[in-house]
Image: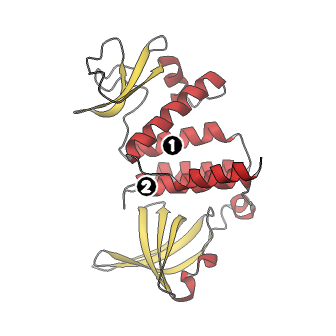
Amino acid sequence: MKEQVNFESACLLHHRMVGEQDAVLTLFTQCHGKLSLWVKGALSAPERIPLFKPLLVSWRSSSGSHRLTQLEVDPSYLHLLSAQLNSTYLYSAFYVNEITHYFLPELAENQSLYQDYLWLMESLSKQVYIEPVLRIYERQLLMASGWLNDLSVDMISAQPVVMDKQYLCVKHPHYGIGVVDSSTYNGTTAERQLSISGKSLLKFGANQLDNPETLSEVKRLMRWLIHFFMDGKAISSRSLFSSYKLSNR
């Protein structure tokens, strides 16, 4: 069955050349989630497809494969189109694309997460304080993609997180990855787990990361989770960022 999709909002996550004239694009699309498109001819050149800019994309699908037919920048996002990312903001954008490419399932539509992605890119283009923005997007990505349970709820008891309690982030054989009340959890110490305060979890859930102690706890939590989920796979954009920091000392 053939299908034609016209002018859907999308952003480029990854570009891979195949030979000299063809390419495979991985896009984060508004209504079709992550999608791989085959591109032939002049449009396959990397300089023709801008990173970190909203696009309008048309493609034709047949027998499970998708071929790009048209691509242009989306004029609805004027600020993003004119913005130039640099230094830490540029490397953060590469990091966001890498984890989105890794964690987002193929063809899993999530318009809310797509808006979160655009919000993050706009925040980077405005050079806001990076850390809170990245932590919020990491959480939204992992939850929306089904990797992580709601961090504001004890995943076993289904009770809301309480401010003055301490919680463990663990992998449970039946409930998945999430937080549990450390005073009642009967798991073994051999399990991979990380401790975090209920106060920080609640602040995180409300996107209130202006306190340095809370932000530090939340950063430690999200780094632990992403490292755990990637099962030892290196994040190449972090290596690029480390090299950048060394070269600018």
- Pointer 1: residues within 10 angstroms few (<14), some, or many (20+)? many
Q: Who is closer to the viewer here, 189 or 149? A: 189
Hey, which residue is sitting farthest left in the picture?
174
Task: Please say if 207 is above or below 65.
Answer: above
- Residue 109, image x, y percentages: 40, 56
Name the mark nearer the viewer: 1 or 2: 2
Please give the name of the residue rendered at 67% of the width and 67% of the height, measured from the top-left corner: 75
- Residue 89, image x, y percentages: 69, 51
Please give the name of the residue rendered at 56% of the width and 70% of the height, measured from the top-left corner: 56
Q: Amino acid at mark 2?
A: Tyr
- Pointer 2: residues within 10 angstroms few (<14), some, or many (20+)? few
Closer to the chain start, of discs 1 and 2, is 2
Q: Who is closer to the viewer here, 148 or 91? A: 91
SS category of the residue bearing label 2: helix
- Classify residue 34 by image quadrant: bottom left
Spatial CA distance of label 1 from label 2 is: 12 Å
Whether residue 10 sits left or right of residue 126 in the image: it is left
Whether residue 173 sits left or right of residue 246 in the image: it is left
- Residue 209, image x, y percentages: 62, 29
Hey, which residue is sitting farthest right in the picture?
249
Task: Please say if 100 is above or below 7.
Answer: above
User: Can you tell which mark lies on residue 26?
Assistant: none
Residue identifier under label 1: 138
Asked if one can make out residue 14 in the rendered structure from this viewpoint, the answer is: yes
Q: Amino acid at mark 1?
A: Glu
User: Can you tell which mark lies on residue 102?
Assistant: 2
Count the numbered circles shown: 2
